[in-house]
Amino acid sequence: MAVIPTKRARGANALLHTGFESTYGQPPASGYRRVPFVSHQLGATRGWIESDLLGQGRAPFDPTQDVTVNDGNLVVPVDTRAIGVWLRALFGAPVTTGPVSGLYTHVFTSGAAALPSLAAEVALPEIPRYSTNYGLRANSVQIAMSRTGLLNATLAMIGKGETSPLTASSAGAPTAYAAIDRFAQAVGYVGAASDTYNGVASAQFTYSNALDKVETIQPDGEIEDVDPGMPSFTGSLTLRGLDTPMEASGRDGTPRPLVFGWARGTSSLRFSAPRVFFPRVKTPIEGPNGIQQSVDFLAAASAGVLVTATLVNDVASY
């Protein structure tokens, strides 16, 4: 009996190439970028529906093929350059100004009537195997903040489908950003405008586009499109300081502005919500150590804007 060798792929050598689509569900022919990632769960699945026929004996009949589903999370580093690709997917194209001293300011604003779609080719060079997920739209992003550790963003993506694997890349010669410079948890801050709040032990926030799948009858079994819903900006804070504006907001019911941000050299990133509501919560005492509160929050729009993401770096455009 002959032994058939297998080709094994390793995550360390995997590559991710992304390009924005001009027509939904049609991967672009060029313009791809190689972007860093931590992990991904992209890829189309298509199951089978068990036969329900009776009266033909005990032997089961063939199953029927079900619809195509391409939903999954993508974890990416929160860095100074490539994160702009994902912010564009979440918010739409930014308003960019500059350069000023070699730096550009990109302002991404919630509430766009239409959101872009992109294609993402996953490359496994050892095999070789190249497959492209197309019609991807960004449903949500979640970022957790703590005093230490790596700063990552978890993106929930909804796709239309995936191409059959090829032995050569369809992305041509993807360009890459000059360098990968990650923001660090250790330099994050929570505040309002130019003020930084002390007493925040940890935080996490989620921006969601509340995407709605257009699940119409299609000959290919794929979804027709994905429409944006009403966005939301929610999260939670763990407070060691019991006299913060967030704690006061829970008592008086007045919304407060809230900013999450990071800086690295001359680059920076901040998420700003102008009106954030905090509930009134208990202050439990569970031992001799420091007392802390866990506070959830919910943002509302101001002049039609729920949240803005401002990225300052040396990239001219997204």
Image: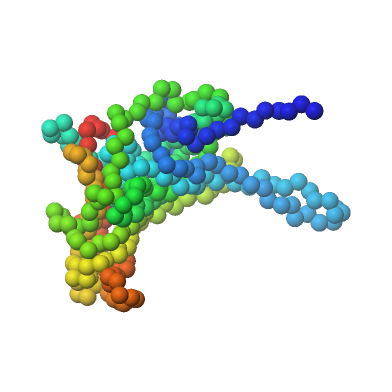
User: In which image quadrant can residue 87 be found?
Assistant: top left
Q: Position of residue 97 (x, y in %)?
A: 17, 37
Q: Nearer the viewer, residue 6 or 253?
A: 6
Of the 4 image quadrants, the one containing the C terminus is top left
Q: Is 196 on the left or on the right of 219, as rendered?
A: left
**Residue shown at 36%/42% (left/top)?**
77
**Residue shown at 75%/55% (left/top)?**
52
Q: Position of residue 286 (x, y in %)?
A: 34, 76
**Residue shown at 44%/26% (left/top)?**
171
Q: Position of residue 213 (x, y in %)?
A: 47, 50
**Residue shown at 72%/47% (left/top)?**
63
Which residue ends up furthest to the front in the rendered image? Answer: 288
Q: Is residue 292 above or below residue 215?
A: below
User: In which image quadrant can residue 222 be found?
Assistant: top right
Q: Which color scheme does this rendered protein use?
A: rainbow
Q: Is residue 228 visible?
A: no
Q: Is 8 on the left or on the right of 118, as rendered?
A: right
Q: Nearer the viewer, residue 61 or 241?
A: 241
Q: Is residue 4 visible?
A: yes
Q: Is 193 on the left or on the right of 152, as rendered?
A: left
| Marker count (numbered) | 0
Q: Nearer the viewer, residue 17 or 147?
A: 147
Q: Nearer the viewer, residue 79 or 227?
A: 79
Q: Position of residue 146 (x, y in %)?
A: 31, 55
Of the 4 image quadrants, the one containing the N terminus is top right
Q: Is residue 72 above or below residue 174?
A: below
